[in-house]
Image: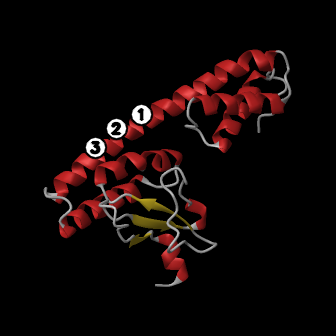
Amino acid sequence: MSVDERHRVPQYAERPAAGNGRAPEMVINSAPGGALESDVAVPFLAEAPGPTQEGCVMNARPYTLAASLARPVARGYLTRNQADSALLATAMRGARTGQIHHDPVDVFRIARHILTLKLADMHARRELAAHHIKRLLEPMIGSRKPSRALLAEAHGVNGEEGFPLTEDEVRDVVRDEVWWSLPSGGRHHG
């Protein structure tokens, strides 16, 4: 497989069990532009990805994996198809190795349902955080606070909410609120 093909298709590698009775974990590597969040899991150090790749350790238990994939999917680091593929591969691998004693298709369906529920929850949390940021910014924009103060307060609200939005998304919310608060003569349409 060439370097270009490796960057387009996620690569899965199984991490050996640590001898602690836990199931083996998988490492997923992605292209430089689609880097995965470090909050999904701790990077696997034995086969750490190269400088042009970022990776994360993925749990071999499909239900735990489904819950941990919600944030990267909600933020756009993974597509829903990639997350579903990882869940299906985990369910099939678990059935093949004897760790899952149920029909792998049923396990996949339940894991996919868990992912759907977590995504709905994450979407609601993101919308709520954006709404709280907008409500906080209204009086600050009216009193003509500097943009760095607006950004600082917006990031503070995002942190209080558990960081559902990325830094760029918070900046976009602030920029949009400032834009729409300008008098209509100050906006340049074009």
What residue do we see at 40% from left, 35% from top? 120
Circles 3 and 2: CB atoms closer than 8 Å: yes
> Could you say where residue 133 lies in the image, as x and y percent from the top left?
65, 25
User: Does residue 179 appear anywhere in the picture?
Assistant: no
Where is 87 relative to 142, above or below? below
User: What's the amino acid at mark 1?
Assistant: Asp
Quadrant in the picture for the C terminus: top right
Q: Quadrant of residue 95?
A: bottom left
Residue 109 image point, x, y percent: 23, 50
Depicted 25 relative to depicted 119: above or below:
below
1 and 2 marks in contact (CB < 8 Å): yes
Left or right for 147, reference 88:
right
Q: Look at the picture and state if 116 lies above or below 175.
A: below
Coloring applied to the structure: secondary structure
Residue under circle 2? 117
Horizontal and vertical percent position of residue 98: 17, 65
Q: Which mark is residue 113?
A: 3
Residue 2 bears which disc, if any? none
Task: Choose the circle earlier in sequence order: 1 or 3.
Answer: 3
The residue tagged 1 is 121
